[in-house]
Image: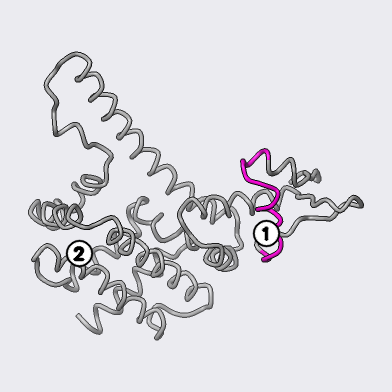
């Protein structure tokens, strides 16, 4: 990396944040400056910029500052952590491109007085994001039921459901960083929470409970599909594999 550093004002302008925010990050130990100049100004080197990039990306995911600090502490390998986040960003970019194409097509149809094609209007939106995977593994009815359940939730219910997933992912990452094994008590308690979290959506569709096959099949998807992997590896590289292994143990013991 370069030996150059940048002032707090330069960093604030480049990132669109404020000097006050950067000073707060310093005060709580999240982003200390590389040095303090004789003028009392904070300066940041290339390593600090990489750390700040990770902080801002995790903020975009909705994590609290305390959770971000834990995530940075649990995976100090910037390249691996950024690689996991890059995979998530690329999957999001593909989804947003699908959304943009869908909206663009709707605008064109409206401008030209053409008939709207409902099947093309929702590409890239949550309702159909994983339809192919779900239908292939568990049948079209499973997708339709799950889609109906999700659509019926309020905004706060959806947020709570997603918050629980993020909390579980962070817990698995912390356990892995602490050197625990997937079959240890804490990871197994997290696997129990994972099973309960999944069971909420399954019960909401009137379908059978989450079986061992269903549970371990999802765990394998977390590893094989980059989109699912990113939902766990943002908390620490290799978290998805750790989650899968813990789910397998839990299924063998309890399902």
* Numbered badge on residue 71: none
Q: Nearer the viewer, residue 77 or 37?
A: 37
Q: Residue at x 25, y 74 (%)?
A: 196
Q: Residue at x 14, y 68 (%)?
A: 203
Residue 243 on image: x %, y %: 37, 69
Residue 26 magenta-highlighted: yes
Q: How would you classify the magenta stretch by its main secondary structure?
A: helix
Residue 231 on image: x %, y %: 39, 57
Residue 200: quarter of image: bottom left
* Numbered badge on residue 201: 2
Q: Nearer the viewer, residue 236 or 162?
A: 162
Residue occupying the far right of the picture: 38
Residue 239: quarter of image: bottom left
Q: Quadrant of the C terminus?
A: bottom left
Residue 28 magenta-highlighted: yes
Determine whether, in the image, residue 157 is placed left or right of residue 96: left
Q: Quick one: label 1, few (<14), some, or many (20+) residues within 10 Å?
A: some
Front of the two marks 2 and 1: 1
Q: Which residues are magenta?
A: 13-29
Determine whether, in the image, residue 235 is placed left or right of residue 5: left
* Numbered badge on residue 24: 1
């Amino acid at each position: 990396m370069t030996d150059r550093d940048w002032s707090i004002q330069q960093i604030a302008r480049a990132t669109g944040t404020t000097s006050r925010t950067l000073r707060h990050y310093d005060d709580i130990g999240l982003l200390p400056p590389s040095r303090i100049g004789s003028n009392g100004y904070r300066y940041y080197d290339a390593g600090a910029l990489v750390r700040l990039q990770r902080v801002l990306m995790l903020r975009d995911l909705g994590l609290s500052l305390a959770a971000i600090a834990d995530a940075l502490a649990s995976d100090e390998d910037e390249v691996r952590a950024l690689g996991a986040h890059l995979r998530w960003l690329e999957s999001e970019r593909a989804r947003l491109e699908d959304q943009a194409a869908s909206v663009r097509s709707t605008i064109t149809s409206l401008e030209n007085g053409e008939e709207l094609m409902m099947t093309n209007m929702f590409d890239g939106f949550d309702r159909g994001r994983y339809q192919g995977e779900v239908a292939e593994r568990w049948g079209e009815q499973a997708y339709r039921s799950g889609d109906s359940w999700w659509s019926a939730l309020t905004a706060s219910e959806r947020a709570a459901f997603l918050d629980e997933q993020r909390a579980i992912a962070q817990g698995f990452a912390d356990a892995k960083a602490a050197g625990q094994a997937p079959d240890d008590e804490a990871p197994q308690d997290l696997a129990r929470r994972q099973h309960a979290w999944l069971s909420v959506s399954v019960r909401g569709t009137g379908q059978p409970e989450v079986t061992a096959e269903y549970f371990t099949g999802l765990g394998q998807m977390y590893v094989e599909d980059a989109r699912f992997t990113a939902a766990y590896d943002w908390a620490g590289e290799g978290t998805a594999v750790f989650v899968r292994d813990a789910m397998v143990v839990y299924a063998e013991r309890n399902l």
